[in-house]
Amino acid sequence: MAEIVNKVAQSSLKTFNLEDYYPEGHREIIDIKDWLFEGIILKEKEFRVNLKNYDWSKYQDAYVALHCSSEAIVPGWAYLLITSYLQPVARKIVYGDLEFLNATLYQNILEEVDFSDYQDKPVIIKGCSNRPVPENAYLMALQYLQPLAKSVMYGEACSAVPLYKRPKSK
């Protein structure tokens, strides 16, 4: 009987798994409409009182996304004022949804990654994830890997989709 050989394990193929860089930590989203009169009108005095009396401790060490789900026109300073209360307790604050928050976190992390191990290697960006890896993180990863890698694929070794192959030098 012939021995089963794992050719993927023996190849020079390097896997880049974004899940390995998943930023641990609690995520929260704050909907500013909850502090607006009838969900659509910002009354400055009431708004300021509500923020001052709010218990911000639940956002301790959290990643926080600020947004407004209503059609209200919210002045920019309102988000800044909320941020001024969050800044002493939260890890990171962004304007947007949780997808944008996660993309921002990945951007910060990927900027610090040493990609030199992928130089002149065939690379596969792992596609399946058990955590919420935003689509933008895949785009960012490709932008870091493509200038270095010999080739870049997406998916799993058994069913990878080719994305890029460096042209052969003449």
Image: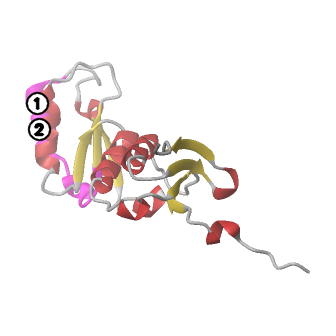
Neighbours of disc 2 within 10 Å: few (<14), some (14-19), many (20+): some
The image shows residue 108 at horizontal and vertical percentages of 27, 52
Residue 64 lies left or right of residue 137; in this view the side is: left
Give the x, y percent position of residue 98: 38, 43
Residue 24 appears in the figure: no
Q: In this view, does 20 lie above or below 2?
A: above
- Circle 2 is placed at which residue position? 81
- Based on the displayed image, in which of its 4 quarters is residue 94 positioned? top left
- Tell me the element at label 1: helix
Quadrant for residue 46, please give it.
top left
Going by the numbered disc 1, the residue's amino acid type is: Trp
The answer to which image quadrant residue 67 occupies is top left
Q: Do the residues labelled 2 and 1 touch (CB within 8 Å)?
A: yes
Three-letter amino acid code at the position of disc 2: Leu
What secondary structure do most residues of the magenta stretch adopt?
helix
- In the picture, the disc for residue 77 is 1
Return the x and y of residue 89 as percentages of the image width and height: 17, 57
Q: Is residue 125 magenta?
A: no
Q: Residue at x 28, y 56 (%)?
A: 62
